Amino acid sequence: MEQVISVIIMIAVGAFFAWIEKLSKKKAAATDSRLAAEAASRRSRRKAVMPPVPRPPSPPSSPAQLPVIIEEIGLPEEGARVTADPPHQPAGATPPAPPQSSANAAWRDRWRRAIIDSDILSPRF
């Protein structure tokens, strides 16, 4: 009698595991089809939402057609100022230099050294 009960229990456990496996396969198939449908809808929305990418103008076919902008503008001489004067200063005026003191210089050197040390000691990766 005990053997019959153990056989029935073994068959029931086997059937239970087969049922669980069948249920998981069915659920996986439903999930795969749902994911495929979501991916397709995302692709169609992306195509509908994104504007077309503008293409850059095609480059000239020969070097003779290249514009010569450097010759028209000209290059500044070495050491010459290439930026405009600020609006609050008269043309050609240089801003006054900040007053230098030994305490200010020591403070600036201490900060400079701290920044360099921080850069050296900080991990790169």
Image (cartoon, rainbow, N blue to C red):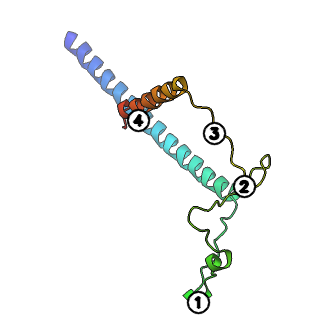
Mark 4 → mark 1, Cα distance in angstroms = 73 Å
User: Considering the numbered disc 3 on the image, is that residue within a helix, a strand or a loop?
Assistant: loop
Dot 4 corresponds to which residue? 22
Q: Position of residue 43 (x, y in %)?
A: 60, 55
> Going from the N terminus, do you reach mark 3 or mark 4 first?
4
Residue depth check, mark 2 versus mark 1: number of the one nearer the observer: 2
Dot 1 corresponds to which residue? 64
Q: Residue at x 51, y 40 (%)?
A: 31
Mark 1 is surrounded, within 10 Å at the Cα level, by few (under 14), some (14 to 19) or many (20 or more) other residues, namely few
Front residue of 4/29: it is 29
Number of numbered discs visible in the structure rendering = 4
User: Considering the numbered disc 1 on the image, is that residue within a helix, a strand or a loop?
Assistant: helix
> Going from the N terminus, do you reach mark 4 or mark 1 first?
4
Question: Would you say residue 88 is visible in this rendering?
Answer: yes
- Asked whether disc 4 touches disc 1, contact meaning CB atoms under 8 Å apart, the reply is no
Number of the label disc, if any, that sits on residue 97: 3
User: Does 105 sit above or below residue 91?
Assistant: above
Q: Amino acid at mark 4?
A: Lys
Front residue of 69/80: it is 80
Q: Amino acid at mark 2?
A: Gly
Q: Quadrant of the C terminus?
A: top left
Number of the label disc, if any, that sits on residue 92: 2
Residue 124 horizontal side relative to residue 46, left or right: left
Residue depth check, mark 4 versus mark 2: number of the one nearer the observer: 2
Residue 60 horizontal side relative to residue 110, left or right: right
Q: Position of residue 82 (x, y in %)?
A: 65, 61
Residue depth check, mark 3 versus mark 4: number of the one nearer the observer: 3
Q: Residue at x 63, y 79 (%)?
A: 71
